[in-house]
Image (cartoon, rainbow, N blue to C red):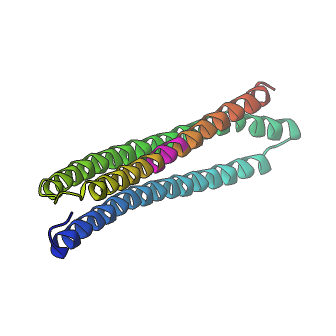
């Protein structure tokens, strides 16, 4: 099948380098997304802390219980708005990660298929008679490897979609829970 061991070694090296490049690209995209989520969480925590301290100070300086209750009640609506904004920003980050991941994964899969198809064609055009079964086995193995890679990509996309759905549910729940409290 391979006319010499060097041809096999080069094909194996090319495939390994491609897989490493794909892994590095997807890992880089994931790390960037995690960094964005951490930055969002830190900014949100800082904002909440500052808002809480300001509200606490205002409540403590209130002249009577009714004024203190009014200050506390007035803090509910901005809190709801902040939660909705946070959920929207988090959803945007996750959608961006998904889009970049999908784009990178699809591009790498298409490139790998083209490269391996060309390699298989080059290798199999000079197959010795009687080696057809070996060529078929190699082609099947490569097709199965790509099917597995596509399955992992599909599972990852589904996981990201599940996270997005949970964020949407949380956003709806926060809005529903705080809506009646804000009206009171």
- Viewer-closest of 156 and 17: 17
Is residue 90 visible to us here?
A: no
Q: Quadrant of the C terminus?
A: top right
Tell whether 10 sits left or right of 95: left
Is residue 66 visible to us here?
A: yes
| Residue 127, image x, y percentages | 16, 58
In this rendering, the count of numbered labels is 0
The residue shown at (22%, 69%) is 8
Question: Is the residue 159 above or below the residue 128 in the image?
Answer: above
| Residue 135, image x, y percentages | 27, 56
- Viewer-closest of 148 and 94: 148
The picture quadrant where one finds residue 183 is: top right
Residue 156 among magenta residues: yes
The residue shown at (47%, 43%) is 154
The residue shown at (78%, 34%) is 70
Residue 3 among magenta residues: no
Judged by its main secondary structure, the magenta piece is helix
Q: Quadrant of the N terminus?
A: bottom left
- Viewer-closest of 23 and 168: 23
Q: Which residues are magenta?
A: 152-158
Tell whether 71 sits left or right of 84: right
What is the residue that sits farthest to the front in this orientation? 130
| Residue 57, image x, y percentages | 72, 52
Tell whether 96 sits left or right of 50: left
Question: Is the residue 35 above or below the residue 173 in the image?
Answer: below
- Viewer-closest of 112 and 39: 112
| Residue 71, image x, y percentages | 75, 38
């Amino acid at each position: 099948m391979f006319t010499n061991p060097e041809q096999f070694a080069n094909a194996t090296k090319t495939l390994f380098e491609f897989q490493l490049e794909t892994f590095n690209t997807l890992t880089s995209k994931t790390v960037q997304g995690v960094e964005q989520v951490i930055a969002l969480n830190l900014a949100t925590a800082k904002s909440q802390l500052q808002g809480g301290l300001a509200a606490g100070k205002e409540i403590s300086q209130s002249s009577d219980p009714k004024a203190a209750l009014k200050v506390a009640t007035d803090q509910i609506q901005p809190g709801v708005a902040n939660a909705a904004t946070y959920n929207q920003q988090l959803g945007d980050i996750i959608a961006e990660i998904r889009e970049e991941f999908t784009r990178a994964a699809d591009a790498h899969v298409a490139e790998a298929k083209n490269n391996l198809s060309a390699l298989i064609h080059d290798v199999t055009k000079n197959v010795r008679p009687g080696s057809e079964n070996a060529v078929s086995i190699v082609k099947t193995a490569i097709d199965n490897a790509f099917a597995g890679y596509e399955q992992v990509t599909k599972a990852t996309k589904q996981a990201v979609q599940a996270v997005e759905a949970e964020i949407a549910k949380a956003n709806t729940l926060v809005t529903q829970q705080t809506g009646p409290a804000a009206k009171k």
